[in-house]
Amino acid sequence: MTLSPGRRHLHLNVNIFQSGIFAGAWRAPDGDPRAAFSLDRYITTARIAEAAKLDAVFLADTPVLTPDIAHRPEYALEPTVILAGIAAHTSRIGLIATASTSYNEPYNIARRFAALDQLSRGRAGFNAVTAAGPAAARNFGLDQAPAHRDRYRRAAEFVGVVGALWDSWDDDAFIGDSARGVFADPARVHATDHQGEFFRVRGPLNTPRSPQGRPVLVQAGGSPDGIELAAAHAEAVFSAAQTLDEGKAYYRAVKSRAAALGRDTGGIVVLPGLSTVVAATRDEALERLNGLQDLIPLRYGLDRLAALLGIDADALDPDAELPWDLIGPAENVQGLQTFFTVTPDLARRERLTARQLIRRLGGGLGHRVVAGGPADIAETIEEWFTSGAADGFNLARRAPRRPRGLRRTRHPRAAPPGTVPGRLRGRHAARPLRPGPAPGRPARARHGGGAGPMTRRLSLLVNITGAGNHPGAWTLPGRAPDAYVDPDHHLRVARTAERGALDGVFLADIPALHGDVGHGPGQALEPSMLLTYLAAATERLGVVFTGSTTFNEPYNLARRVLSLDHASRGRAGWNAVATFFPGAARNFGLDTVLDPGTRYRRAEEFIGLVHRLWDSWGTAPSSRTPTERASPTPAGFAQPATPASSSTSRGRSMCRAPRRAAR
């Protein structure tokens, strides 16, 4: 995504949507019901998109398992974990992940995206969403989601804190002078000292300034609060529009509000969602579209539509228009206001029945669906781009196994002569997702002889600690001072360990900058991100990461560990710790560390809840992925841990690992 000012370019991302954007795509002859659980599927799509010179891959997310799982794959693997694996197999394409500002802590999110930016050498983007709905709230100790306005106030403060943490290292803070033993200049590493309505964060971040300085900030929201957040903070804005006029209106609203806030509107791109069904001819594409629409379960479509409209599904007659008398105004909706506005408008404008509306949307919520030959798709993209309705699009693939539409974007027929003159670039974008400086910032001056999964107790691990266990190791001849944030350095260590028949690699961690940064590196890259990168480039080596029970939520951590286990095909382990470092406490709103009794009681509850989440899916063979059949649940290497208060979660994990084998 070329976000620097200058000549206007068309931006094209691909939304890798589980098993395809159409609700029934996984049932198609070229569908795959297990694709949502396979890192290889995501990597394949990303590599095709990179070869086609697209700007970025994007992963949406919601931290809850919905009833939709009865009819289609849901969001399963945690997006930042997937993108860390993709980073190991790509070199130029941007990597944008969604994370909730309602159910995460700023310090944890800032670390994960800074780590992704380091691992990808400057290709990371953070899509900040507020995550609506009571089901997600109940996974984090709440009975209901906070009110719409409160969620957006929290989101604005959240992204401000994340930005301040990314800026806590000056551009020239890293020194790396091994002769003098000066690793970094502490005077150029600053505490954040944020105290606001929702967060108290001491800082600084324990990850040095990443290649982009700040990962690209993305936002998606069509409500007045969403537009305000996007106009104030975002560099890319995802939107939904069914008509050219709707697209223009939203485009003007975001750009004019950004200008009123004093921002350069040339540094903000608006990218509507566009679901495409592409074939050699328009007739063939329409035939494919009709086939995909036929695969949408009606019950699924009615339930999803009713939930969006805030009415009971029984009030929807499939063959009648929507019950307009039951549908209230958008401002009364606490959830997805963007789609709430677009979807009923489409139904009213074209007098669609509920059944027809479900088919038009592909079983989705409101993104535009276009079917045709390559020239047809290029024509509609060109029209919106030149009319001031879009700076590009988030393209949603139709089905998971063979992303034909993506492959056609690089085929010569995808842009016939004269169709998109001067818009599609002849070469790939610069390696960083954002080639220029961040807004407001200056430019930066398993064991070989055994089975793959860890099915036995580990005997030999290598602990990858910063630049070595000895505090002065980084000063030795031949050592690179910045090796502790260099993914290639860690990959060399991991591959050496795998060749040496070691069982696994292990990463310790403290969520704070600790020790004397002036004299040596600590653990910088967030462990689950780094280990996914390593797992994607190894075959047998176990990957064990440290996660604090004090400064994480059980639901979030359970997802990350299971996502790592899927990505590694059953090689993940979790070292549960009860963090006692005072500096870490001050990054999460506490003045001091909790007492040992409280920390360990919380740790015991936390670990038990994580195991129950792992076991929340049944073990019927038909419901398992190949990965799950091959590996046990990741072991909890329990050294109890420590949050401020007992955490509650009432949900189910969104991706299942099998029951642990009896010992």
Image (cartoon, grey):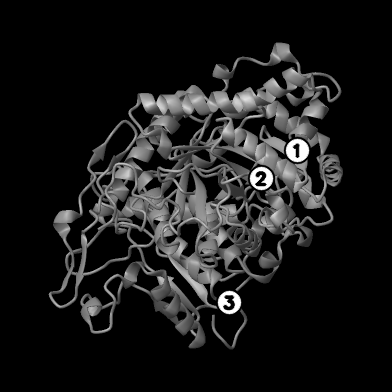
Q: Quadrant of residue 52?
A: bottom right
Q: Which residue is mark 1?
A: 362
**Mark 2: secondary structure:** loop
Residue toward you, 354 or 256: 256
Q: Residue at x 37, y 50 (%)?
A: 436
| Amino acid on which disc 2 is placed | Gly
Q: Position of residue 623 (x, y in %)?
A: 75, 57
Residue 539: mark in rendering:
3
Q: Quadrant of residue 323?
A: top right
Q: Is residue 321 left or right of residue 139?
A: right
Q: Which residue is mark 2?
A: 418
**Mark 3: secondary structure:** loop
Kindly report the distance in space between the C-alpha atoms of the residues bearing marks 2 and 1.
31 Å
Label located before the other in sequence (1 or 3): 1
| Amino acid on which disc 1 is placed | Gly
Residue 103 visible? The answer is: no
Q: Residue at x 38, y 27 (%)?
A: 259
Q: Position of residue 142 (x, y in %)?
A: 49, 34
Answer few, some or many: residues within 10 Å of disc 2's Cα (few below 14, many 20 plus, some between 14 and 19).
few
Residue toward you, 417 or 537: 417
> Which residue reaches farthest front?
418
Kindly report the distance in space between the C-alpha atoms of the residues bearing marks 3 and 2.
47 Å
Q: Quadrant of residue 430?
A: bottom left
Residue 82 visible? The answer is: yes
**Mark 1: secondary structure:** loop
Q: Position of residue 551 (x, y in %)?
A: 37, 50
Label located before the other in sequence (2 or 1): 1
| Amino acid on which disc 3 is placed | Glu
